[in-house]
């Protein structure tokens, strides 16, 4: 059995593509491993959220099954993610 930790990010992304998993392209290695393993992606540090783009924030909301975020501006979306993820 292959350990996910030994796979590169490129290989993990290819695995996501082969498994027909969506919204994986902006995830880091730890979150790709969690996604392939059937677990929800996590935020390691709330300060990381401040550095995310709108696309990344929306992807994070979608991956965590949240709703009501699509019309928020960036500052409101940042607060929404910090409160719900």
Image (tube, helix red, strand yellow):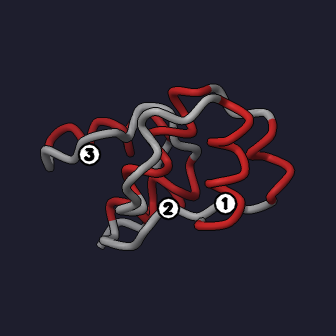
Q: Which residue is mark 1?
A: 43
Q: Which mark is residue 15?
A: 3
- Left or right, residue 74 beside residue 22: right
How far apart marks 3 and 2 lie (CA) works out to 16 Å
What is the quadrant of the N terminus in the image?
bottom left
- Left or right, residue 7 beside residue 13: right
How far apart marks 1 and 2 lie (CA) works out to 7 Å
Q: Are marks 1 and 3 in contact (CB under 8 Å)?
A: no
Secondary structure category for the residue under label 1: loop
Sequence-wise, the earlier of marks 3 and 2 is 3
Percent coordinates x, y for residue 60 in the rendering: 50, 48
What is the quadrant of the C terminus in the image?
bottom right
Q: Please determine whether, in this image, residue 22 is positioned above or below residue 83.
A: above
Sort mark 1 into few (<14), some (14-19) or many (20+) by Cα contacts within 10 Å: some
How far apart marks 1 and 3 lie (CA) works out to 21 Å
Q: Are marks 1 and 2 in contact (CB under 8 Å)?
A: yes
Secondary structure category for the residue under label 3: helix
Q: Are marks 3 and 2 in contact (CB under 8 Å)?
A: no
The residue at the point 44 percent across, 62 percent down is: 4
Percent coordinates x, y for residue 48 in the rendering: 79, 46
Percent coordinates x, y for residue 30 in the rendering: 58, 58
- Left or right, residue 58 beside residue 1: right
Nearest the camera: 80 or 3?
80
Secondary structure category for the residue under label 2: loop
The residue at the point 80 percent across, 60 percent down is: 45
Q: Which mark is residue 2?
A: none
Q: Which residue is mark 2?
A: 41
């Amino acid at each position: 059995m292959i350990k996910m930790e030994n796979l590169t990010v490129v290989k993990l992304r290819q695995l996501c593509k082969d498994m027909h998993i969506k919204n994986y392209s902006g995830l880091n290695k730890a979150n790709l491993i969690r996604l392939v393993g059937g677990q929800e992606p996590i935020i390691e540090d709330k300060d990381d959220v401040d550095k995310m783009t709108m696309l990344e924030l929306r992807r994070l909301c979608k991956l965590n099954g949240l709703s009501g975020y699509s019309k928020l501006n960036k500052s409101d979306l940042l607060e929404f993610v910090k409160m719900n993820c």
